[in-house]
Amino acid sequence: MIRIGAQFQEERKKQNLSLEEVARATKIRVDFLSAIERGDYKKLPVVSYAHGFVRNYARFLGLPVEKSLALFRREFDEKKSIEVLPRGLTNQGEFSLPKFRIGRSTILIAAVLLIIVFFLLFQYRSAFFNPDLKVEAPRENQTVNSLIVEVKCKTDPNSTLSVENEQVPIEKNGSFRKEITVFPGRTSIDFQVENKFGIITAVKRNIIVKPSD
């Protein structure tokens, strides 16, 4: 079957007309005329304009208008049908990734999974993070006027606490308080806590001991 565009092109050449001459006479742009002759209807505006271009082009060339429009509509509908098929079957050499829509169920499942992950991280955070150790007394560089110093700290009650390399008991809430003996001058007190996964946190407090006379 001869395409309507090919018929237009053949008749135009018989009449020794260029696309520019047809464009001036019909007021249709050259690129639109060329698209019609090639059957490249994607390059044309909306369908109503395309029908008008084909009608005016056929009338200008002296071809049957209604027959030309019928051929155009049939070709146009065939092209639309082909474009509905998967691109791999149209031999256009193009490929596009499939589009996915995220539904409510997918979002809900993702939210539940995130909650589970955060819960597990919270439960087993001690396997990844150092245990907390807050030394409340003595303060760093504190001057003490006695050989007896009160040490006070708080940590995870499930951890093991050592003060001056000696393991000490802690309360159920993780607190510890005790008085220890120190020597005069600048000295330090070492605190260390270790959780059940073997992760350690260490704190050193430097103090100055100046006993009162």
Image (spheres, rainbow, N blue to C red):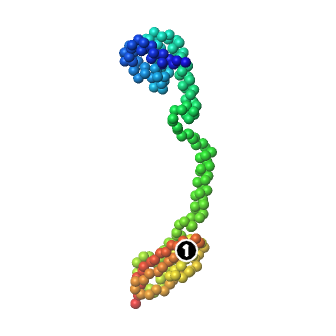
x, y (%) of residue 73? 54, 19
Q: Is residue 104 above or below residue 158?
A: above
- Left or right: where does residue 14 sit relative to residue 102? left
Looking at the rendered image, the quarter that the C terminus falls into is bottom left
Q: Position of residue 120 (x, y in %)?
A: 60, 60
User: Residue drawn at (48%, 86%), measured in percent from left and top?
Assistant: 181
Quarter holding residue 104: top right
Residue furthest to the bottom in view is 213
Residue 134 shows in the view:
yes
Closer to the camera, 211 or 35?
Answer: 35
| The one of 41 and 137 positioned closer to us in this rendering | 41
Could you say whether the residue bearing mark 1 is in a helix, strand or loop?
strand
Is any part of residue 45 visible from this angle? no
Q: Residue at x 51, y 19 (%)?
A: 3
**Type of the residue with mark 1:** Glu
Where residue 121 sits in the image (x, y, percent)? 58, 61
The residue beneath circle 1 is: 194
Image quadrant containing the N terminus:
top right
Residue plotted at (52% across, 73% down): 200
Q: Is residue 94 or residue 27 the one in the foreground?
A: 94
